[in-house]
Amino acid sequence: MLEIKGLEASIGDKQILRGIDLVVPSGEVHAVMGPNGAGKSTLGYVLSGRAGYEATAGLATFNGADLLDIEPEERAALGLFLAFQYPVELPGVGNANFLRTALNALRRARGEAEMDAPGFLKLARAEMKRLSMPDDMLKRNVNVGFSGGEKKRNEVLQMAILRPKLAILDETDSGLDIDALRIVADGVNALRGPDFSALVITHYQRLLEYIVPDRVHVLVSGRIIRSGGPELALELEANGYAGMVADAA
């Protein structure tokens, strides 16, 4: 599924990633944890192709394709999805139109027939019901006037409709109360299966109580300093990062 070898990346003249090695097999959910400024979000941005984040060394392949050599829309067509920490507002762009346009763009890129409006609305309403989202959110502009929790649910709705093969969740738990956190986690867990993988980027173990990872990786100063099972997140929750950073120095 996802294989990263010796990945280095910079923002302008500042190096952020300093040699990332990581493999996420098909059907597995991996968590990336670390303190502020460790490079967690940068990793997600480099993999998704965000402008300004430049890979300077190493490899990143997704289902055999060289991610670093193709455009962001091509990565999306392959099945890669990035859920943002801070979803942007799109004034004047209706949520339903945005979602259907995104879905049909992917379907065209894959040689599939586009979905008509009635078919899309049936799909969207079913997913919204599962995520406890009111129907009127489809009529609103994308994220405009949404609460923090509504924005994150809208990201998960996008993921549920687009059905990616690899989802990168960039601190999706940020700013969520416990009820919203559970709903978002349920949306992610509903996609779990042999053809879906996820890279969950988070500071805290709380989210991982609901989205239980197969592996946990600790990212500090642009490097993965330790990997382990779900118990590693509990260790971090109990002891913090300081001791682990000192041991890796």
Image (cartoon, helix red, strand yellow):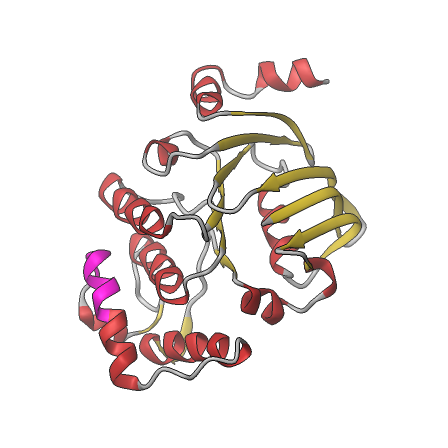
Labels in figure, total? 0
**Lateral position of residue 179 relative to residue 15, left or right:** left
Residue 211 drawn at (x, y percent): 36, 38
Residue 248 drawn at (x, y percent): 69, 18
Q: Is residue 137 visible?
A: no
Task: Check if residue 131 falls in the magenta segment.
Answer: yes
User: Is 16 or 108 nearer to us in this picture?
Assistant: 108
Task: Work out which quarter of the rendered image holds the C terminus and state it.
Answer: top right
- State the image quarter where residue 62 is shown: bottom right
Residue at left 46%, top 25%?
A: 233
User: Is 95 or 14 nearer to us in this picture?
Assistant: 95
Query: Where is 58 relative to 112, above or below?
Result: above
**Lateral position of residue 83 relative to residue 77, left or right:** left
Residue at left 64%, top 20%?
A: 245
Q: Is residue 5 visible?
A: yes
Residue 116 drawn at (x, y percent): 32, 86
Task: Check if residue 177 falls in the magenta segment.
Answer: no
Residue 61 drawn at (x, y percent): 68, 53
Query: Where is 158 relative to 184, above or below?
Result: below
The region drawn magenta spans 125-133
